[in-house]
């Protein structure tokens, strides 16, 4: 059962007898389960209920007005992961088989309340586990995309091999062997890259690796390029996964004839030149080894991600040209600490990203990892940092993970550490937050309770604030248009972005209230702008909860009337992916807000399998192209063609288009010539708490 005590079970009961449904609810509540029940007795009621949020369905087998088979058909037709438990008065073997064959997850006897309770707990547990797995899989896919980009940009020749055949290789690898494109070696055996005198021994090595035997640290041989020229090389092997399939990662390097020079080059290759710490690829290999050790040998290790507090403000104070000096000073302070004999060579530090440092403490329990985090915080805040000719006091926010058998996955480890760093920074910094799977229930409950309390306070005391980013029309219209960006002001001057709290808000049923708070504030601002003779259009993001809030449209109408705002100035935007999976609800939502002349925008548009198929069923007023099409636009001809196609097809349908995250003048020129209607991005103007952009 979910460990969050304030997370209510959204229960849908299919039963024509009110008293029987109430008895089921009472039994669950008496057992300590918070229940949000909805009852449906007819097909129409069930269809309406299924359009809203639900976790579990209890369906009576004996119902006459809506048979169990019809109810199962409606539930299955939603495509949702919605487990059904059949509630029976009595049960025989044939009926049991028929119920499970119809798609029910379990059967419970009505007169056995403990049986009902047990099945509800089991199915809710399983549902939460599946949801968590889907979230982790999404993070894993994102991590894999980032790793793939990192591998491609690496100077090391890297290939992925499955059953001895190439399935992926980066540019450095292709260049080493003289190939122009990966298509030239796709499916080619790794043996074809090996000198003939080494083939038999290399076959034996591949066989042993296929059996799961550990690879040698280095394997030296003569490699052959496209022209058949041999050169001395060494290979390093790591068990890996590519696109979900097990494979071998092969790092191949030319052997240097001068051993000392080779060692020196290897050392340089592994180091970040600014901080002197290990670079990200080298550190990731060590982290993968630690995670493997935790999974296979029950090893214990600690990971810390360290971010200097108020980094961008520091850069403004010392100057952008001193960014490297700032990071060098931080790296030097960290290295001095890690060289302490207390850590016995077990701690390694790295520059993990632009201004994030990482430390892996091998063979450490939770107490040891926490002690290191405290030492790092103290080292940062103890003395003034010398930054070139300047100096500054610097504190840090640390997110950590205690790596053990329960979290033996690199993607999970990095995700949890990142969350901890963001959370530490979000509440003011100069603190650490370490995720310990052994104490997961307690830590997670405390963390979630604190966030829920903060969100509740923000809703009750109007601590949600809006920032505004200008949206500029490329076709000559000078009307003021802004996108609203949500921030949480906890009262300490440090604004928190939605990525830190929206997941918790969703899990605790607060998205609907946040939607209303944001929309109400936006309409109030619109009213003030109109009153001062500065009419403005605002684009406001709403969540999936808006589609389930049957009273939201009426609320919008009331607010528009109260503030004297014509509905045409309010544009509500939803992500394309959410609309695809909630099309009927979106259609109803669009119709409802359309009665007040409000408009609908689809954001993150164009990344679906067939995004324009969606427009056969729904006609939004605005399409906001997915940011992936705009990044690196001047150098990506495929993205340029996609942008032109979206703009052209949208124009034919009478729909306006917006390109966001515009970063340079070259992109602006391409977007203008492609017929895009609006643009926004830091190149034009950053988001601000005030609307002061000159659209003239």
Image (cartoon, grey):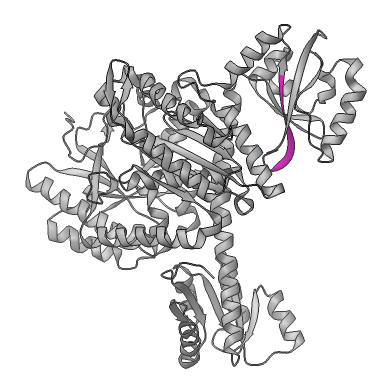
In the image, is residue 245 part of the stretch drawn in magenta? yes
Above/below status of 503 relative to 663? below
Q: Quadrant of residue 609?
A: top right
Q: Position of residue 653 (x, y in %)?
A: 40, 42
Q: Position of residue 536 (x, y in %)?
A: 18, 43
**Prevailing secondary structure class for the magenta stretch in the rendered image:** strand
Above/below status of 234 relative to 623? above
At horizontal 60% and vertical 73% (from top left) the residue drawn is 122
Q: Which residues are magenta?
A: 241-252
Above/below status of 373 relative to 263? below
125 vs 237, left or right, is left
State which quarter of the image contains the N terminus: bottom right
Q: Position of residue 568 (x, y in %)?
A: 23, 50
Q: Residue furthest front?
A: 341
Q: Nearer the viewer, residue 220 or 372?
A: 372
Q: Nearer the viewer, residue 293 or 538?
A: 293
Q: How many marks?
A: 0
Q: Position of residue 500 (x, y in %)?
A: 38, 49
Query: Visible in this render: residue 122?
Result: yes
State which quarter of the image contains the C terminus: top left
Query: Visible in this render: residue 597?
Result: no
At horizontal 18% and vertical 60% (from top left) the residue drawn is 559
At horizontal 26% and vertical 25% (from top left) the residue drawn is 316
In the image, is residue 279 part of the stretch drawn in magenta? no
155 vs 613, left or right, is right
At horizontal 51% and vertical 21% (from top left) the residue drawn is 272
Q: Nearer the viewer, residue 113 or 326?
A: 326
């Amino acid at each position: 059962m979910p460990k969050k005590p304030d997370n209510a079970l959204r229960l849908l009961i299919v039963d024509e007898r009110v008293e029987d449904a109430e008895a089921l609810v009472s039994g669950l509540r008496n057992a300590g389960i918070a229940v949000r029940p909805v009852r449906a007795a007819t097909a129409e009621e069930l269809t309406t209920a299924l359009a809203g949020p639900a976790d579990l369905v209890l369906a009576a087998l004996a119902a006459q007005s809506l048979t169990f088979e019809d109810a199962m058909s409606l539930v299955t037709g939603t495509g949702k992961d919605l487990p059904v438990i059949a509630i029976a008065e009595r049960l025989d073997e044939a009926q049991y088989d028929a119920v499970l064959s119809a798609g029910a997850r379990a059967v419970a006897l009505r007169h056995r309340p403990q049986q009902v309770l047990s099945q509800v707990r089991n199915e809710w547990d399983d549902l939460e586990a599946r949801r968590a797995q889907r979230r982790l899989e999404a993070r894993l896919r994102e991590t894999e995309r980032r790793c793939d980009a990192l591998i491609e940009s690496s100077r090391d020749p890297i290939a992925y091999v499955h059953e001895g055949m190439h399935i992926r290789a980066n540019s450095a690898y292709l260049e080493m062997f003289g190939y122009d494109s990966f298509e030239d070696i796709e499916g080619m055996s790794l043996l074809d890259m090996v000198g003939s005198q080494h083939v038999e021994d290399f076959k034996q090595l591949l066989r042993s690796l296929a059996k799961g035997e550990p690879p040698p640290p280095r394997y030296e041989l003569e490699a052959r390029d496209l022209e058949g020229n041999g050169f001395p090389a060494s290979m390093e092997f790591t068990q890996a996964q590519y696109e979900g399939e097990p494979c071998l990662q092969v790092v191949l390097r030319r052997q240097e004839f001068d051993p000392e020079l080779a060692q020196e080059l290897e050392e340089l290759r592994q180091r970040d030149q600014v901080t002197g710490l290990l670079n990200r690829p080298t550190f990731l290999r060590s982290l993968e080894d630690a995670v493997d050790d935790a999974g296979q040998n029950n090893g214990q290790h600690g990971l810390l991600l360290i971010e200097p507090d108020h980094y961008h403000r520091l850069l403004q104070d010392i100057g952008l040209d001193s960014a490297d000096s700032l990071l060098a000073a931080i790296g030097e302070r960290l290295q001095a600490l890690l060289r302490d004999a207390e850590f016995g060579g077990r701690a390694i530090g790295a520059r993990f990203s632009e201004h994030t440092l990482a430390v892996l403490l091998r063979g450490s329990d939770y107490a040891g990892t926490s002690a290191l985090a405290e030492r790092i915080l103290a080292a940062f805040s103890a003395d003034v940092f010398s930054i070139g000719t300047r100096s500054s006091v610097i504190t840090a926010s640390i997110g950590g993970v205690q790596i053990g058998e329960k979290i033996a996955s690199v993607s999970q480890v990095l995700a949890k550490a990142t969350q901890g760093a963001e959370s530490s920074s979000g509440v003011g910094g100069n603190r650490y937050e370490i995720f310990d799977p052994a104490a997961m229930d307690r830590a997670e409950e405390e963390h979630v309770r604190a966030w829920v309390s903060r969100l509740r306070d923000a809703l009750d005391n109007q601590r949600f604030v809006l920032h505004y980013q200008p949206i500029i029309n490329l076709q000559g219209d000078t009307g003021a248009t802004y996108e609203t960006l949500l921030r949480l002001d906890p009262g300490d001057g440090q604004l928190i972005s939605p990525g830190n709290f929206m997941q918790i808000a969703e899990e605790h049923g607060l998205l609907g209230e946040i939607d209303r708070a944001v929309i109400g504030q936006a309409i109030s601002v619109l009213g003030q702008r109109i009153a001062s003779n500065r009419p403005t259009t605002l684009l406001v993001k709403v969540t999936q909860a808006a589609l389930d809030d049957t009273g939201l449209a009426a609320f919008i109408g009331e607010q528009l009337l109260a503030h004297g705002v014509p509905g045409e100035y309010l544009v509500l935007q939803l992500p394309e992916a959410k609309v695809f999976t909630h099309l009927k609800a979106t259609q109803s939502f669009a119709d409802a807000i359309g009665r007040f002349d409000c408009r609908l925008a689809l954001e993150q548009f164009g990344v679906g399998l067939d995004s324009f198929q969606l427009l056969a069923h729904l006609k939004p007023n605005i399409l906001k192209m997915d940011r992936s099409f705009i990044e690196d636009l001047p150098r990506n001809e495929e993205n340029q063609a996609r942008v032109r196609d979206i703009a052209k097809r949208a124009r034919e349908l009478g729909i306006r288009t917006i390109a966001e995250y515009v970063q340079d003048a070259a992109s602006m020129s391409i977007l203008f010539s492609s017929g895009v209607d609006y643009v926004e991005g830091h190149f034009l103007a950053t988001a601000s708490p005030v609307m002061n952009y000159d659209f003239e």
